[in-house]
Image (tube, rainbow, N blue to C red):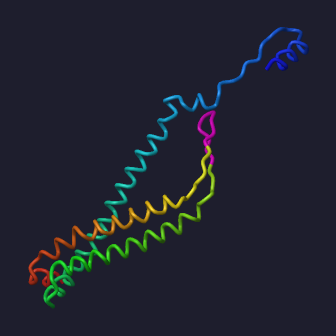
Amino acid sequence: MEATNRSLELLTGVGGQCKRAVEPLSFSLWPANRIPARLGRCRWSSDGIGAIFAAMNTMYSVVANRASEVGTLRALGFARSAVLIAFVLEGLLLAVVGGVFGCLLSFLINGMSANTTAGMSEISFAFRVTPTDLTYGLLFAATMGIIGSLLRTACAARLPITSALSQV
């Protein structure tokens, strides 16, 4: 800084002082800069809840349309718990296959970056898919499969056999 100040004085003939601009890290610690991250987390959470309800609705309709199968299995002598476990395992298998497919698709955007201009500033970010992200995605898919199939199948398994068979 001293050399810059002397060069400025020699070139212009006017005394002056150069000062360092605001440190980049001190600006990022400003509380208002945390607002977009918090809004993003709120949006991601609401999107996640919407995805859970969409997946559970799909599983509900699948099991509701197969109530006659539940009745047939019960009429053949399978216990309620066996029918419940069979449908929950089927839901889990379908959800995990979907989760693996989603994880494979996420590798298509791995390493891509995006830029956007907001007013006088530019925001840049890069997509990174980590093993932790993949693990959470698969666990999330498995949980949705279990919960989505468990609730509706438990209701269908409690139906009397004649009621379940009449829902053809």
Q: Quadrant of residue 69?
A: bottom left
Q: How many marks?
A: 0
Q: Is residue 134 above or below residue 61?
A: above
Picture residue at 38% right of the left edge, 71% below the top? 95
Magenta: main secondary structure:
strand
Q: Give the quarter of the figure containing the C terminus.
A: bottom left
Picture residue at 16% right of the left edge, 76% below the top? 157
- Name the residue furthest bottom: 76
Q: Quadrant of residue 80?
A: bottom left
Q: Which residues are magenta?
A: 115-123
Q: Is residue 19 above or below residue 147?
A: above
Query: Is residue 151 found left or right of 138 in the rendered image?
Result: left
Q: Magenta span has 5?
A: no
Q: Residue 1: where, in percent of width, then height? A: 79, 20
| Viewer-side residue, 67 vs 110 | 110
Picture residue at 34% right of the left edge, 60% below the top? 52
Q: Residue 12: where, in percent of width, then height? A: 88, 13
Q: Quadrant of residue 116?
A: top right
Q: Residue 68: where, in percent of width, then height? A: 19, 83
